[in-house]
Amino acid sequence: MSAPRLLIANRGEIAVRIARACRDLGISPVAVYSEADRSSLHVRLSDAAVAIGPAPARESYLVVERLLDAAKRTGATMVHPGFGFLAENAAFAQAVIDAGLVWVGPDPKSITAMGSKTESRARMQAAGVPIVPGMTEPARGPDEIAAFGRAHGFPLLLKAAAGGGGKGMRVVRSEEEVPAAFERARSEAKSFFADEAVYCELYVEEPRHVEVQVLGDRHGRVVAVGERECSLQRRHQKVLEECPSPVVGPELRARMEEVAVAAARAVDYVSAGTIEFLLARDGRFFFLEMNTRIQVEHPVTEMVYGVDLVSEMIRIAGGAPMSFERRPDPRGHAVECRIYAEDPARAFAPSPGTISRLRWPHGPGLRIDSGIEEGDRIPLDYDPMVAKLVAWGSDRDQALRRMRRALRETRIEGIETSIPFFLELLQDPDVVSANVSTQFLERWTYSGGTGASAVEEELALVAAVLGASRAARAARGSGQPSWPSAWRTARPTYGSRE
């Protein structure tokens, strides 16, 4: 009997991650690809692959009809959307279900309820989940924003009602700033989300971003699987994540998990999802939003709690209960760095190109989630993520040391990457001591790569070896004693043989 097939409606490292989960479950992975991804790793690792159009996502990965046709042509009975693209699109989820396929994700109604920032806030408020004071309906004009500010105080944060990823956000620190900020936020919201609705909430100064992983099944179970620290963000995009949060103790963790479960139950949530909170300096926390999909940073939770979240999603979608009745006990600490094809020395300008040389780090406690191999090309058409490096340790200090080692060992040539940025960031005393907030990187300045690059380090090493070799030969010629070669010193000896 042939294995059931699952269509992966995505690309890059998350498509590779899903394909591997399929293999572990005895499911045959099916890939889709644009012209830019014809020879990508996720295609090479799948049993079947279907071309779905040109490089632009709007002509390929965002075309519902082509994705459904690919499932039909390959005999796939399940569809996993990964993250990004159509992962939180309720209409796509419903189209998959209407086509008689299994949607690996939450019900479309749950996606709709939590996809609207204003509706989700209203639902959370009704469920007793603490929320930042704010509007539960879009503002009809700047006058309503100004009135809210007079009643609750400034600063305020203007947000796109249908948005995410930092788009359509504006901080307003006085009533005089409201009209211009409202128009800019509305214009951005319309451009990015085809919906100009904007609302506002009280802006919490110097908060931390802490999110709780939840998992629900169709047997009535909803479990919170710990929290993640995601405060280090650049332009509202996370760049480094940790599990657990270094500032969340047992009592606060229990409260946050209890609230996260209540939030998930309020929308009858099934599958993996994330409840995001703002954690204030005084220990209060407020609901921010719910991501109704697997998160980019899910590996740190998997490393600490020993749970395969992607496999759980697939099992749950098939009607099975999750594989545990209560949250597993955490073990150790994990840190994730998102490695992007960007040049941090040039204001993080995109750096597309072909990977001419690639060496991943190895050793205890390391995990690499990537969608590339040596010789692959990083296109300009999509998110520039190259890999996620994850380091686990018995405690946070060991995890950070392992991450620094992993970054130094990694060699990616042919493009620029954000590795030098992380090497410098992870030496900062405030980062090491976890004294950060979501505004930390707005003030932190990258030096511009004053340290040696990976290539420069290797050239320096070669020069040192050649210099030592010349010195040794000169010493032998002069009759002076010389140091033994590094090779003879390092290689093992057996018995007394030389």
Image: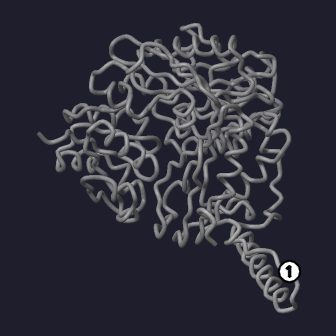
Residue 33: percent from left, percent from top: 34, 57
Residue 17: percent from left, percent from top: 42, 45
Q: Left or right: where does residue 268 sit relative to residue 28?
A: right
In depth, the one of 298 and 142 nearer the eye is: 298
Tell me the kind of residue under disc 1.
Answer: Pro
Q: Which residue is mark 1?
A: 481
Give the residue displayed 44% in from the left and 31% down from the top: 309
Give the residue displayed 33% in from the left and 16% down from the top: 218
In depth, the one of 195 and 147 nearer the eye is: 195
Q: Left or right: where does residue 47 sit relative to residue 348?
A: left
Callout 1: 10 Å neighbours few (<14), some, many (20+)? Answer: few
Secondary structure, mark 1, is loop
Does 173 sit above or below residue 374? above
Residue 19: percent from left, percent from top: 35, 46
Give the farthest residue toward the left. 1
Q: Quadrant of residue 329?
A: top right
